[in-house]
Image (tube, rainbow, N blue to C red):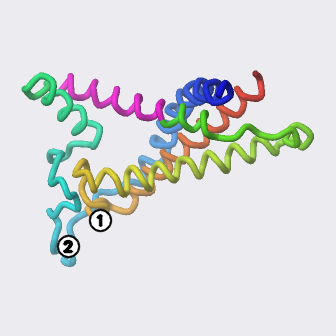
Amino acid sequence: MHDRIKGFGLGLLGGVAGLVGMRLAQRLAAPIVKPRAPGSTDVFVTESTSLLGWRHGPDEAANEALARIAYEALLHRAPSTRTKQRLAWLFHVGYGLLMAALYGALAPPSGRGARRRPGHATRRAVRSGAAFGAALWLVGDELALPLLGLSDKPTAYHPTRHLQALAAHLGYGVATAATTQALRSLT
């Protein structure tokens, strides 16, 4: 139990590095993103894949929609643009830190063999971090957000936007795992 609590704290710290890694990967991938123009095969361009219906506004990101929904539920009025942006940032950071903390609590520590083989722990952290980031992207961005009505269906976005999001999540996962692993080996 003590190892899980320690891992939770180390993962939380790793999540700070993960959020920085995500932002860097996002900026590096930004030049490849193109808008997706509706094509002749887009019969259901405005159709939502959500069972809950539309929960986001036009050009409103998922974390902005969550911020607006929470604010309206608590205060029964719409937030200002600035308030919505700040709350959206808090939702994103909070979610990223929570996922990193859970990763730290659940990821197994590297074995003693990692100390005898230089680079083994690093390669393992990169692999598990990449898998962690890719899973968050697939389950969160590609499945959960559209199903909850917090984003448009995946085909509404240009493929390069999906690649940018995947790159950002891979950056987050690798930075989180590598930092968590490095902190774990120091303690």
Answer with mark 2 or mark 1, whichever residue precedes in sequence.
Answer: 2
Q: Residue at x 17, y 27 (%)?
A: 71
Q: Which quadrant holds the C terminus?
A: top right
Q: Which quadrant holds the N terminus?
A: top right
Quadrant in which residue 115 is drawn: top right
Disc 2 target residue: 42
* Residue 61 position within the rendered picture, expressed as x and y whole percent measured from the top left: 26, 43
Q: Are marks 2 and 1 in contact (CB under 8 Å)?
A: yes
Disc 1 target residue: 155
In the image, farthest residue toward the bottom = 41
Q: Which residues are magenta?
A: 81-98
Q: What amino acid is found at the position of numbered circle 1 in the picture?
A: Thr
Q: Is residue 175 visible?
A: no
Q: What amino acid is found at the position of numbered circle 2 in the picture?
A: Asp
Q: CA distance from mark 2 to mark 1?
A: 9 Å
Left/right placement of residue 108 relative to residue 32 reads: right
Return the residue nearer the eye: 50 or 177: 50
Q: Residue at x 67, y 37 (%)?
A: 178
Vertical relation: 119 (above or below) 154? above
Return the residue nearer the eye: 42 or 3: 3
Vertical relation: 175 (above or below) 132? above
Return the residue nearer the eye: 45 or 65: 65
Dot 1, crowdedness within 10 Å: few (<14), some or many (≥20)?
few
Q: Secondary structure at mark 2?
A: loop
Vertical relation: 47 (above or below) 74? below
Return the residue nearer the eye: 161 or 90: 90
